[in-house]
Amino acid sequence: MSDAALIESPVLERVLHEALARGGDMAEIFAEDRQSQGAALDDRRIEELSSGRERGAGIRVVVGETTGFAHTADLSEAGLLAAAEAAAAVAREGGSGVRTVVLGARSAVGPTATEMPESVTKATKLELLGRADDAARSTGDAISQVQVGYGDSRRRVLIANSDGLLAEDDLVRTRFSVVCIATGDTGMQTGYESLARTEGFEVFERVDVDEIARVAAGRALSKLSARPAPSGELPVVLAGGSGGILFHEACGHGLEADHIVKDTSVYVGQIGQMVASPLVTLVDDGTVGGEWGAFRVDDEGRPAARNVLIENGVLTDYMWDWLRARKEGRLSSGNGRRQSYQHLPMVRMTNTFVLAGESDPDEIVAQTPKGVYVAKLGGGQVNTTTGDFVFGTTEAYLIENGHITEPLRDANLIGNGPEVLRRIDAVATDFATTPGTCGKDGQSVPVGCGQPTLRISGVTVGGTAA
Amino acid sequence: MSELPDLARTIVERAEGSEAVEAYLARGHDTEIRVFDGEVESLSSATSAGVGIRVILPGESGEGNRLGFAWAGSLDADVVDATLAEARDNARYATPDPDVVLAEPDGRAAVEVDLWDETLEKLATQEKVAMALELERAVRGADPHIRQVSSADYGDGSVEVALASTTGITAFTRRTSAFLSVSAIAGEGADSQTGGGFSVGRGPGSLDPDVAAHDAVLRAVRMLGATKAKSGRCTVVFDPRVVSTLLSVISSAMSGEAVVKGRSFFAGRLGESIAVPSVTLVDDPTDPRAYGAATYDAEGLACRRNALIEAGVLQGFLYDTVSARRGGTTSTGSAVRGGYAGTPGAGCRALVLEPGHLDQDAVLASVGEGLFVQSVTGVHSGVNAVSGDFSVGAEGLMIRDGKLAEPVREVTVASTLQRMLQSILHIGSDLQWLPGIAAGQTLAIADMQLSGD
C-alpha cells in the first residue's frame, strides 16, 4: 500500500463542485483503502489464511434535512463524478447554485504501527496460532477443541468536504482471539479471550498469546463444574475490565445525538441532571492511542476528542456527528463513524470509560454478603427508548458471605439504564479496558470499553436456579 | 445475460499444474430510503461487486491438500489477477489435509427456484420514496398513542452470483428482494414503548405497508404500562418471530462442521429422541415460499430438502463438502457463505418446523397461565449453542385465563436448548415465512425460568 493521497486534491475539488452543481448545503467524499489478512486455526489445523482488499469512495450530498448517498469502487475522476451525480439526485433542480470548493493543505499522517503487518511474514503470524493452540491444550485434558484467530488490517481513509476540510487517517489494527471448548460429565462449556489493538505487530512484543490461550481455556474449564446462575434481583459486582459493555449499553447508546434529536432516548432533556450515582464519571475518548476504538480523525474528518458525558453523576453532554451537531448549531464531538465507504456515517461511540473511583476492589467483594461476581462479560443489547438493556456473562461466580465461591453457567442480566446507573454504590481503583465490536443499524465498528471494579446494588440475573 | 459466468470461467482456466481453483463472483445493486417526519432523511443507491478465490494445492504422495483464500471488492482485471496470486500464496501455509477438496458435481439435478422479480428495476425512485412515506403516515395515524416513528425504511436489492471451479462446477444465480420496515414509539405519560414491523418480498409488489404498520403499532401500544414480573417457573409462549430466531440458534448445532469438530450437543445422537414427538424440522431451500430459497448452495451443488428431526428423532446434519468428508459422508448441498469475502461452511437456509393444529389464540387458551413473549434481546450474548445454555431478555404479556393480559418488560426467560426441545407443549398452525433462515409459528414451552423482581 503506497502512502500517496488516495485521491489528488484537484480531483476532489472538481468532484465536490460537481456534487453541489444542482444545489445542496454540503458535499463530502470519503475514500477508503483497506487491506486485511486473517488466519484461522481450528481442530489443530491451520485451515485458512485469507487476504482481502477493498477500495472505494462514498459521496454524500446534504440538502436541507435530506442526505443523498452513493458509493463506488472506481476511484478515477469519472467514477467519482458518476457517484457524485447519483448522490446529488436528492438535490432539487435549480437549487441554490454553484460554489467553488477550495480544500485546505494536505497533512499526511503516519500509520498507527511501528511494525507494519505487510512487513511481517505469513509464517511468523501463523506461528502465533500454533503456540496458542498448544498453550490452551496444555491446561488440561478436558480441553477438547480450540479455535484461534488472527487478523490485521490497514485502513487508509481520506475525507474532503465542500467546507474545505481535508483530512486523512492511516489505521493499523491487530486482533487475536482464542475460543476453547471443555468437555466433562456435565456437557460442553466454552471460554473466550481476545486481544484487539489499534497497533501493528509490535503488540506481540508486549502481549503473550500463550496467556490469552490460558485465560480462554481456564474460563471453559471452570464452567464444567459451574452451577446454574441464580434467578432474580441480586447485587452484582463487575470486575475491572470485565467489559465496560454495561455502560456502553446502559447509557452510551442513549447518549448518541441521533437518538436525542429524534426523541427516542430516555436521556432526552436530562443535561445538567443527576442521571447516575455520584460515583460515576463517564467519558468517551477516541484519542487514547492503541485502544480498539481509537483514531486520529473520525470518518467525517473531525479530530478524535475526549468527551465527558457524565461527571460525578451529572449528565454533561451527548455525542455528536456532523449532521446532528449542525441541527443544534454546534460542532461535532468527533463521533461520526462508519463501517466502510459503502455506509453513511452516524453517531458512534469510540472508547467509553467509567473512570476509576476510590474503593479497594477486594473490599467491595468482602462487603457483599450475597451476590454475583462477574469476571467477564460477553455482549449486550439496549432499547434506547425504554432504557432496558441486557448483557451476558461468560465468566461469573457466586458471592457468599463476602467471598467469591462457585462458578456459574452463562446467563444474561437485564436492567434499565437510568435505574442501574443510580444503583452503582461502589467504584474501585482498578481501571482496565477491553475491546469490542459495536453493531448499530447494520454497521459494525471497533470500540473500546473500560471500567474499574464496581457494584450494582440490585440487577436482575437471568439464570435458571430459583 | 450477465458476463459473470464467463469471467468466473476465465479465472478458473488460469489454474496452474494440478492445483484446484474456485472463483465466486458477485455483483449487487442496492437502494435504501429512510424517511422521517414526512421527509426523505437519506437515500442511498449503489452497485458493488467482488470476487473470492479459493486455491487448493494438492499434497505430494497423499500427505493432504492445502487451501488458500483471497477476496477483493472489485472485478477489475488487475485486481482479480492479484487476488488469484494471493490465494495461491496463502495456500502454501495451510496445514495439509486430505479432506480439503472443492465440491464436485454430484449428479443431483437442481430445482430451479425463481427468485427474480422483473418489476424491481422498473420501479422509479419516487415510487419507492412514496411507499416509505405511506408507511410512516400509516403508523402515525393508526393510534393516538403513537408519539414517534423513529424510522421508516424502504430497501431493495438485486444480486447475481457466478461460481466456477476446476472440478467441473458452474452455477449462476440471481435474486431480488425488497423490504419495508418501521419502528414505532407509543407513549402515555412518562411511559414509552417500542414496536417494530416489516414486510419483505422478492419485489415491491409483494410488500404490504399496512401489515408492517399494524405490527409495529400493535407491539408498541400493547406494551404501555409494562412492569417487571415476579420471578418463577412458568409456561412461555413465543411469538412466531421469536421462534424463527430460536430455530436459527438451534440449527447451528446441526451444522456438520460443528458436529465433526466436537462443538455440537447433538453429536453422536443420530436416531435418538431429542425433542417431543410433535417436532419435525426440515431445511428445504427448494420451497420458493422460504426467504432463503435457493437453487444452488455456496459450492454450486443443487440445494435439496434435508430432514433434521422427524417425530422428535434426530435424523441428520447439514454438510458442505469438507465437513462431509471429515464426517465420512457426502455434502447435503448445504454450503453457505457470507458473500465474496467469506469461505463456505455448512448451514441452514430455509428451516421449517412442521405446523400443528392450533392457531395462536387456541395455543394461549390451552396454556391458560404463563408468559407470552413478543420479542427477545441478547440472543448473541445469552444463548450458547455449544453448551445449550439459554437466557434472553424478554418483553411481552402475561397469559391469564387463556388470554393475553398485562404487559411485562425487563425480565429474562431461561432454560437450556436441550430441555426446551423436550418441553414443547404446542406448535402453532400459524406458520409465517419470515426473513432470515427460518420460518416461525407460535410455540409454547413448559417450565422455563422467568427472572424479574
Image: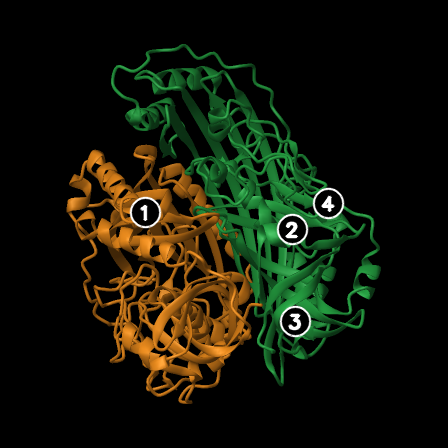
Chain colours: A green, B orange
Q: Nearer the viewer, residue A94 or B368?
A: B368
Q: Nearer the viewer, mark 4 or mark 3?
A: 4
Which quarter of the figure has residue A350? top right
What amino acid is at disc 4? Answer: Pro
Residue found at x 44% / y 36%: A341
**Image location of residue A153, percent across then percent down:** 57, 43
Above or below B272: residue B317 = above
Q: Are marks 4 and 3 in contact (CB under 8 Å)?
A: no
**Image location of residue A13, percent across then percent down:** 43, 16
What amino acid is at disc 2? Answer: Leu
SS for dot 1: loop
What amino acid is at disc 1? Answer: Pro
Residue wearing tag 4: A278
Q: Nearer the viewer, residue B62 or B74?
A: B74
Residue wearing tag 1: B144
**Residue at mark 3 to residue at mark 2: CA–CA distance:** 31 Å
Chain of the residue displaying label 2? A
Residue wearing tag 3: A220
What amino acid is at disc 3? Answer: Ala
Residue B375 visible in image: yes
Q: Are marks 1 and 4 in contact (CB under 8 Å)?
A: no
Q: Earlier in the sequence, mark 3 or mark 2?
A: 3
Q: Earlier in the sequence, mark 2 or mark 4?
A: 4
Residues at marks 2 and 1 on the same chain:
no
Q: Residues within 10 Å of mark 4 (few under 14, many from 20)?
A: some
Chain of the residue displaying label 3? A
Q: Nearer the viewer, mark 3 or mark 1?
A: 1
Classify residue A453 as left or right of residue A44. Answer: right
SS for dot 3: helix
Residue found at x 71% / y 70%: A397
Residue found at x 52% / y 64%: B228
